[in-house]
């Protein structure tokens, strides 16, 4: 049997959530079947930004990170927030689940004139991505 590196595998439909059979063509033009399994956690989301800040809310947006043939499709995102005064992401963290394909979320209710750190992770059937770099956000005074 030829090693798999000698085969050309056609592009795959990346939204399949189950193992699938694909056909590969060797340099000798043989056609063989392979079982393909997703084995990687997703990459971190990209372009994580603040769209709007209020006194009691923060509106955020992002885009999914690039998919690869070994990456299982993203199924949801975990938006994490904490007060900036909290020293660690291990305690006092608010987790909000956002189902894929949504790429927007509103964090509320928040406290006016308070500093928050916010980050996001992508998740799939394998696990979570690394988190994005946190955004530092100061909510507005009441009434704005």
Image: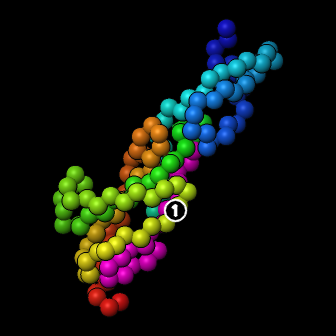
For mark 1, what is the residue? 103
Quick one: label 1, few (<14), some, or many (20+) residues within 10 Å? some
The N terminus lies in which quarter of the figure? top right
* Residue 136 horizontal/vertical position (percent): 32, 68
Asked if 25 appears above or below 77 in the picture, the reply is: above
* SS of the residue under disc 1: loop
Considering depth in this image, is 77 or 5 the residue closer to the camera? 77
Q: Residue at x 73, y 25 (%)?
A: 23
Read off the magenta span.
51-67
* Residue 64 horizontal/vertical position (percent): 53, 54
Number of numbered labels in the structure image: 1
Q: Is residue 79 left or right of residue 112?
A: right
* Residue 56 horizontal/vertical position (percent): 32, 79
Asked if 30 appears above or below 66 in the picture, the reply is: above
* 6 is within the stretch colored magenta: no
Q: In this view, does 33 lie to the left or right of 85?
A: right
* 63 is within the stretch colored magenta: yes
Q: Mark yes or no: residue 78 visible.
A: yes
Q: Which residue is drawn at 67% across and 37% down?
A: 12
């Amino acid at each position: 049997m030829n090693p798999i590196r000698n085969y050309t595998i056609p592009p795959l439909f990346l939204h399949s959530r189950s193992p699938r059979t694909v056909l590969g063509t060797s340099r000798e033009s043989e056609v063989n079947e392979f079982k393909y399994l997703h084995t990687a956690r997703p990459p971190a989301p990209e372009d994580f930004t603040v769209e709007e800040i209020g006194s009691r809310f923060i509106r955020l947006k992002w885009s999914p990170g690039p998919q690869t043939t070994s990456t299982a499709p993203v199924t949801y995102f975990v938006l994490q927030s904490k007060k900036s005064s909290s020293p660690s992401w291990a305690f006092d963290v608010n987790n909000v689940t956002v189902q894929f394909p949504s790429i927007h979320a509103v964090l509320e209710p928040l406290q006016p004139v308070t500093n928050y750190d916010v980050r996001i992770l992508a998740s799939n059937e394998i696990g979570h991505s690394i988190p994005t770099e946190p955004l530092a956000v100061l909510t507005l005074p009441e009434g704005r």
